[in-house]
Image: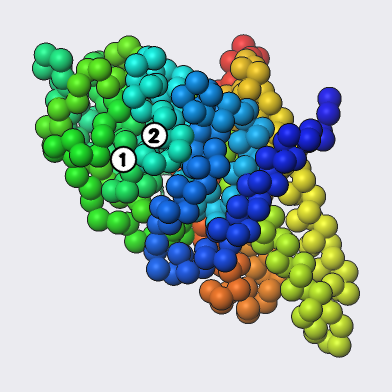
């Protein structure tokens, strides 16, 4: 067992870190304040191979693994967790096409997706079904070579800016077995978007409803067979959850680094903050949490890469553990800044706001515990 990055992994991490330092960090506060989705910057990341991290190379993907993906997303998130998380969602959509699409579908969509000339969104949640995703109601009725799709998807990241929508729809019976996955281009008649949601964080990417009103989607745009959609959606989320966790880790590490630098400079009672043992213990706890999160994330990523039997459980554990602990680390970093941590210009409150939603999306952390508990009980029966 080797917990050290090899030369190639270290170089990949450095490439992503350099990109974050030059292209993301200097602008992140401005994007947050102006609610700007930095599509040009995202496309630059695509040109460096970060739009198809674990996509096969025959369609232009980078052909890397899940550990490398965690390294890249962590590095990007040190600049802006919201931007890194969008790139993570885009990679998840591209992987669903790579893994479950036909050769024709892979050649049609992936070359544009891996460069991020085309952006993509993942559409599972509906107004009346979030955690209970298998209860989704968006209906796709077969009409010759097309499906006619009607319904609404809620909270869709990147909606309005994305070019392709990977949408889970109901083609059959109630429950998970009646769900299929369709890939729908943005310019399909009948597809429209709700208003950009006003939200606590993640201001650097849009969140909008995706509305489908009699949208005609060719049957040729379906991934896998009819009824495979829920399995495809859940498979995507295994890797998605690792990347969301990695985005929390990158944000929390950046908050920790800022807190440490601040504490060396800031004086109270005639000494720098670093002189107080209570605050040193805070730093020690934060550093230990970050290290634990990173180590476990790599463990779960390695299991997913190896298609281990317990990969889904480990991904759920990692998502819950890392997003919870990293939120606490970022919040502690804010506390260590005193009143200045609460000011927007210091960049800490933005990280806290951005990381909060990671405990909610791609399956809430309660649902992560449902997954873990179910697997424990199944194994013990
Ligand atoms: C900013 C943002 C971006 C998002 N982006 C996307 C996206 O791109 N694509 C997409 O499809 N979705 C997206 N989502 C939706 C997100 O995945 C859902 O909000 C999430 O799955 C929770 O669903 P819900 O909001 O309907 O909450 P509910 O399911 O109504 O849950 C409410 C509460 O009840 C708890 N709960 C529910 N069931 C159980 C249970 N069985 N046991 C214990 N507790 C339970 C939940 O944990 C939660 O605390 C996004 C959400 C946000 C806020």
Q: Is residue 381 visible?
A: yes
**Residue 112 numbered mark, or none:** 2
Quarter of the view holding residue 12? top right
**Residue 146 numbered mark, or none:** none
Label 2: how many Cα within 10 Å (few below 14, some 14–19, many 20+):
some
Q: Is residue 250 visible?
A: no
Return the x and y of residue 62 as percentages of the image width and height: 56, 30
The answer to whether mark 2 is within 8 Å of ligand 1 is no
Report the side of 214 relative to 120 (left or right).
left
Give the residue at mark 1.
163
Q: Nearer the viewer, mark 2 or mark 1?
A: 2
In which of the image's four quarters is ligand 1 placed? top left
Q: Residue at x 79, y 62 (%)?
A: 282
Q: Residue at x 55, y 58 (%)?
A: 24
**Lower position in the chain sequence, tag 2 or tag 1:** 2
Report the side of 95 relative to 70 (left or right).
left
Q: Quadrant of the N terminus?
A: top right
Return the x and y of residue 322 as percentages of the image width and height: 64, 43
Q: Please, which colouring scheme is shown? A: rainbow
For the residues labelled 2 and 1, the Cα–Cα distance comes to 10 Å
Return the x and y of residue 274 as percentages of the image width and height: 84, 72
Q: Residue at x 69, y 55 (%)?
A: 253
Q: Secondary structure at mark 2?
A: helix
Quarter of the view holding residue 40? bottom left
Label 1: how many Cα within 10 Å (few below 14, some 14–19, many 20+):
some
Return the x and y of residue 166 as percentages of the image width and height: 34, 31
Report the side of 190 relative to 269 (left or right).
left
Q: Quadrant of the C terminus?
A: top right
């Amino acid at each position: 067992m080797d917990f050290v990055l090899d030369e190639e992994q270290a170089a990949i991490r450095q490439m992503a870190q350099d990109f974050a330092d030059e292209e993301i960090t200097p602008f992140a506060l401005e994007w947050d304040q102006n609610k700007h989705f930095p599509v040009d910057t995202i496309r630059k990341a695509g040109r460096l191979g970060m739009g198809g991290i674990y996509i096969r190379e025959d369609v232009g993907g980078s052909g890397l693994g899940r550990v490398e993906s965690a390294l890249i997303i962590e590095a990007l998130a040190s600049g802006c967790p919201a931007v890194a998380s969008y790139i993570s969602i885009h990679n998840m959509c591209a992987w669903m096409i790579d893994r479950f699409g036909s050769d024709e579908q892979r050649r049609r969509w992936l070359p544009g997706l891996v460069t991020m000339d085309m952006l993509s969104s993942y559409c599972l949640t509906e107004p009346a079904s979030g955690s209970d995703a298998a209860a989704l109601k968006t209906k796709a009725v077969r009409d010759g070579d097309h499906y006619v799709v009607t319904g609404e998807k809620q909270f869709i990241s990147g909606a309005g800016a994305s070019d392709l929508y990977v949408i889970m729809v109901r083609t059959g019976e109630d429950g998970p077995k009646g769900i299929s996955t369709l890939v729908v281009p943005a310019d399909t008649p009948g597809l429209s978007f709700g208003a950009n949601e006003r939200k606590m964080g993640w201001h650097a990417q849009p969140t909008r409803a995706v509305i489908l009103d009699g949208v005609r989607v060719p049957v040729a745009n379906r991934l896998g067979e009819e009824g495979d959609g829920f399995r495809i959606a859940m498979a995507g989320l295994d890797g998605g959850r690792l990347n969301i966790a990695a985005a929390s880790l990158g944000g929390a590490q950046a908050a920790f680094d800022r807190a440490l630098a601040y504490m060396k400079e800031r004086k109270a009672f005639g000494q720098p903050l670093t002189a107080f043992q209570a605050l040193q213990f805070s730093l020690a706890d934060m550093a230990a949490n970050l290290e634990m999160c990173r180590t476990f994330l790599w463990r779960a990523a390695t299991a997913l890469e190896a298609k281990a039997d317990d990969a889904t459980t480990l991904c759920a554990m990692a998502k819950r553990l890392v997003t919870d602990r990293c939120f606490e680390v970022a919040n502690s970093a804010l506390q260590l800044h005193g009143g200045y941590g609460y000011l927007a210009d210091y960049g800490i409150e933005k990280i806290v706001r951005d990381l909060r939603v990671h405990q909610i999306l791609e399956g809430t952390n309660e649902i992560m515990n449902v997954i873990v508990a179910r697997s424990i009980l199944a194994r013990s029966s």
